Image (cartoon, rainbow, N blue to C red):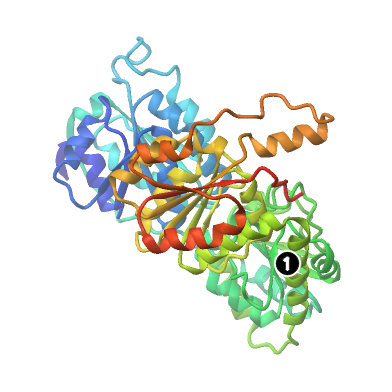
Amino acid sequence: MTRMKGGQAVVAALIHEGVEALFGIPGVHTLEVYDTLYDQPQIRHIQARHEGGAALMADGYARASGKVGVALVITGPGVTNAATAIGQAYADGSPLLVISSEVDSRQRGKGNLHELRDQLGMTRALAKWSARAESVGAIPELIHQALHEIWSGWPGPAHVEIPIDILSAEGDVAFFEPTERPRPCAPAETVHQAGKMLREAASPLLVAGWGVTLAEANAELLALAERLQAPVLTMPLGKGAFPEGHPLALGSAWRTEGASGRLLEGADVALAVGTRLGAMDTRGWSLRLPPRLIHVDPDPTNIGKCYPTELGLVGDPKAVLTQLLEALGPMERPSRAEEAAAARADLAARLAERSPEARHILAGLRAALSAGATLSLDMTLPTYWSASYLPVAEPRAFLCPYSFMALGCGLPMGIGAQIARPERPVVVVAGDGGFLFTVQELATAAKYGLNITVLLCNNDCYGAIRRHQERRYDGRIVDAELTNPDFQQLAEAFGVRAVKLSSAEELPVALANAIAARGLRLIELPIHDLQTPW
């Protein structure tokens, strides 16, 4: 047992659990934690300019690194500001930990500074797990339990709140063995049945989601696809889970018409792994899967929830795919690369026909990926085209919260990704509407000298909303247009080098130049003619 103050226990517990970065803003209720950070080099603190930005940065850090992202916020407004990021992490399955203060436990309900009526109740409605420390000794235990809850089943966010009197009090604390991610296997008999179904299938199909990358099961998925010679569809949230330049890659599950649709119609068994097969993954369940479906998921409640499932394999995707590879053993199957290549060629042809402007934008983003960049995408029209048509070759290079679709996420998530992997440049793709939700975080990127290029796609409106209004209400537009600032001057006020392009054709060269030059830059691209991809 070690005696220390509550603020010291927070930092000591995080260090003990292997946390290396912390995102937040000093507040009067969290000063005990910040004082401990003063001479604590094991954890790097990143100062955000808004608690929502801090929590989104922690989310981006988690997605890019595969580690838990941690945000520290104050009581009340700090927690409500972070609420969007908590909801986003829950919707997508991102390993986010939010630590907050709470009012003095002896004065709760008496109108204290920053007090919410039921702060813990609010976060319990948003997070996967939430708890309050009632003593100094409970702090390491709850942080340890939070990390365990984050990784149990389908990953998701957790919240620990600590009253300010507990943060300043002294107590005896003990630490636990650092949390290891549980990797439960599926029952052997069920794995045997799945192996038999796949071995006997004439035209198997694999469907890969973000959960493959969350479980670090990318290599196992690749090995299984090659052994079965099974083409692979990738969910938009999980782009990069399977390399989309591979001969067996089919591309996005959002685009399954033409040759892709015919291939799906001929599939006799599908194995879905790392996806809950929800509405956003499948575009409102329009994805046509064969009736013989095997679903791998760490959460048993997801099996059969959205699609009829013949066989459910409940367990960690990495562990279960390893089991399946062992159950299948060596196999010789005829190559199906030609079928997959035809589907990819058909997809490329459809893109060229539908929107030359989108094709130029995606060419620029594809070149950025080839240069080793991580893409952090906000909700904007080029993002939706990317979900449908942009091939992504590696995991954690394409960060986009497709389940929650929170405007303003792109820049702070990109900052978190750059902190997580500083060797990789980051390209943030944002629209003029969403960008102004979190533009203040340019100050954070400038403060830390981050290597980020913001691609600002400007159509002076909420583009997707305008398109919906036009189609659904006979062209009647209500408050979708925007009055914007001069984005060049705005960027330069933050010390950001900015350039404005005249057309999307200039983008590939402009992005390549920005990435080569390094540093913080903004490229403004007018996109007035770009439509939605559906």
**Image: 18 above or below 8:** below
Q: Residue at x 35, y 63 (%)?
A: 423
**Image: 409 above or below 474:** below
Percent position (x, y) of residue 232?
69, 69
Percent position (x, y) of residue 463?
66, 38
Q: Is residue 36 left or right of residue 294?
A: left
Looking at the rendered structure, the secondary structure element under dot 1 is: helix
Q: Residue furthest front?
A: 502
Q: Residue at x 71, y 59 (%)?
A: 253
Q: Is residue 53 visible?
A: no
State the residue in front, 283 or 229: 283
How many labels were placed on the picture?
Answer: 1
Q: Residue at x 24, y 37 (%)?
A: 137
State the residue in front, 443 or 214: 443
Q: Can you identify the residue that label 1 sits on?
A: 348
**Quadrant in which the N terminus is drawn:** top left
Q: Amino acid at mark 1?
A: Ala
**Image: 195 above or below 464:** below
Percent position (x, y) of residue 366?
57, 64
Name the quadrant containing residue 347: bottom right
Q: Is residue 394 left or right of residue 51?
A: right
Percent position (x, y) of residue 136?
24, 34
Q: Residue at x 67, y 78 (%)?
A: 247
